[in-house]
Image (cartoon, rainbow, N blue to C red):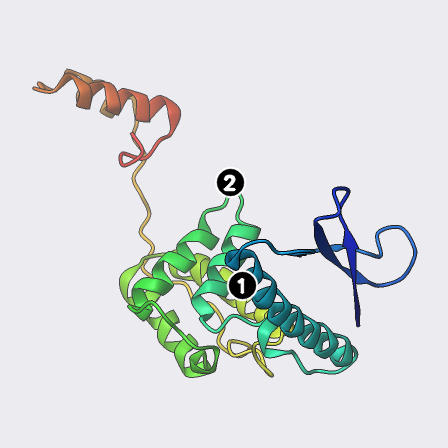
Amino acid sequence: MNFIGLKNRKGDKIHYHYDLGRGKGQRPSMGIFIYVKPKTQEERNHNIETKKLLDVKKGQAILEKQAIGTPFIPKHKLQENFLDYYSAYVSKNKKDNNKHLYYSLYHFKKFINKDHLSPIDVTEELCIEYRQYLLDRLNGECPANYYRPFRRMLKAATKAGYFVDHPAEDVLSKEKKNKRRKANLEAEDYIKLLKTPHFNEEIREGFITSCYQGYRYCDV
């Protein structure tokens, strides 16, 4: 892996680029530079630290290139805190019409109850415990709805090199079999409720809005 330094138009700085060839787009910027003739101690210190950074980046780039075609993932490509990977996965894959992925992370953080989780601690046993945590606290389809995105995230993490084997491969999602059939609100029930004395106009309007729009009471 080679780097190339190119002077800017003024000639006072050298900007570094990856040298991947001579074709279009084969010299992407590294986003770092040094001063050609540093005038102050700060600029001299900047050059010293930047050259150290160049050595680190060069080592990382060489390691990445050598790892191509092998199952080895360089450590610098992985995040030490697995919660950071999970959060980044949610941000990348979230959709406005599906909040299950977001709440899978929300409940997992409550389950872990700490700010740092090493990838080595994400085991099959942990997945079983998280699934049970959801079953103990949520009803109906919710435990399964929040656990499925968790499994998809772990599958992606396995492909990214965090795990040799998918830790939740054999830990499937489960629903809590406590579903209750909800009684429908009939027309006569609706009229009766409208005629019921009330002391808060907002509650009455919220109820009517919920009936016509299909909102849950918490959304209203």
Q: Is residue 90 above or below residue 171?
A: above
Type of amino acid at the residue the image marks with label 1? Asn
Type of amino acid at the residue the image marks with label 2? Asn
Viewer-side residue, 193 vs 73: 73
Callout 1: helix, strand or loop?
helix
| Residue assigned mark 2 | 97
Question: Where is residue 217 drawn, in percent x and y?
Answer: 27, 34
Q: Quadrant of the C terminus?
A: top left
Which mark lies nearer to you, 1 or 2?
1
Callout 2: helix, strand or loop?
loop
Using the rendered view, name the quadrant where residue 166 is placed: bottom right
Numbered mark located on residue 182 in the image: none
Question: Where is residue 184 drawn, in percent x and y?
Answer: 32, 35
Badge 2 density bin: few <14, some 14–19, many ≥20, Cα 10 Å = few
| Residue assigned mark 1 | 45
> Is 206 displayed left or right of 26 in the figure?
left
Q: Quadrant of the N terminus?
A: bottom right
Q: Is residue 61 above or below residue 203?
A: below
Asked if residue 70 can be seen in this view, the reply is: yes
Question: Where is residue 57 drawn, in percent x and y?
Answer: 66, 70
